[in-house]
Amino acid sequence: MDVEAAFATAAGQATQLPWDRAASVRLEDLAPVSAFPVVPGRRWGPGWWWSATTGRHVVHGSASMRTQLMVLDRDPEVTGLAARPVRLLWRDTSDGRVRSWVPQLFARYADGTGLLADCPSSPTAGGDTAQQARVVLETACARVGWAYRRLEPPPTVVAANLRWLAGYRHPRYQGPPGLRAALTEAFAGPRPLADGAAAVGDPLQVLPAVYHALWSGHLTTPLDKPLHEEALVCADAGRGGGGVESGWAAATRRGERSGRHTR
């Protein structure tokens, strides 16, 4: 099946290319090809997510999409994020009609591969149309070494912990020079969060840096358990400590939950 991609270049020029050629375009730098609708009476409307990965805002159209943006933004392998940067078109072999689909999210990984994703609020969201598009997009993405996924929401506790830590994702919360090294030393082994923070200095000044370090991965803790003052925190194993982050949270950091495929 021939698939084409329609998008607006960084200069704003409408373009349509065969998908195999379009996959070389930096989709992470493109504006959305269609706006997220504002639905009267709906409790949730479009908004903006400030990305710690890119230092730019990414638009979102639902609570489930914002949650997936949050998860991808924390993945250390993700280097770029964009909302609705491309529309895929193909001709339906059953009736000859042209079909199209605009994935909600695009993520670029450090190895150059990409992820096109949708963020359904439930597995059945979008109905048969979404499932038919899924088959086409999975095939098209696999052909260029990418992946397409309908992302599942994280468990409730994980999502709550990530929302809290995301509030400290901006670099301004990392604190003055030397504080990160002090945190690494204080949490060289698993230690209660509040205890370690108090050992470094005034908790009112240190705790924001602890939460920023937990967001960025310099410190770890099991995010599949409620985050509180007695939660065990440790310096990340890959950065000189013996990390304690486990389960779903650790899988998320490796990119497994974001639907990533390797070539």
Image (cartoon, rainbow, N blue to C red):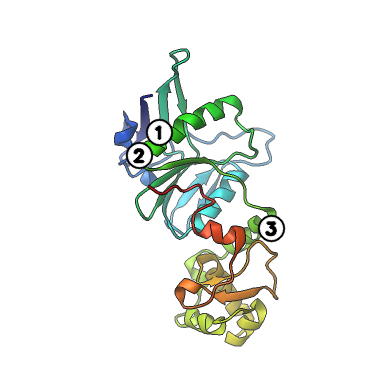
| Mark 3 or 1, closer to the camera | 1
Q: Quadrant of residue 150?
A: top right
Spatial separation of the CA atoms under disc 1 and disc 2 = 7 Å
Q: Position of residue 128 (x, y in %)?
A: 59, 25
Q: Looking at the image, do the residues carrying marks 1 and 2 touch, with CB atoms under 8 Å apart?
A: yes
**x, y (%) of residue 89?**
41, 26
Distance between the alpha carbons at the discs numbered 2 and 3 = 35 Å
Residue under pointer 3 = 157
- State which quadrant residue 188 falls in: bottom right
Position of 56 relative to 246 (above/below): above
Question: What secondary structure is marked by label 2?
Answer: loop
Q: Give the left or right position of residue 76, taking residue 25 as reference.
A: right
What residue would you read off at disc 2? 144
Seen as rendered, the residue at the extreme front is 263
Furthest residue toward top? 95
Residue matched to label 1: 140
Instruction: Give the amino acid type for the residue marked by disc 2 in the picture.
Output: Val
Q: Is residue 193 left or right of residue 51?
A: right
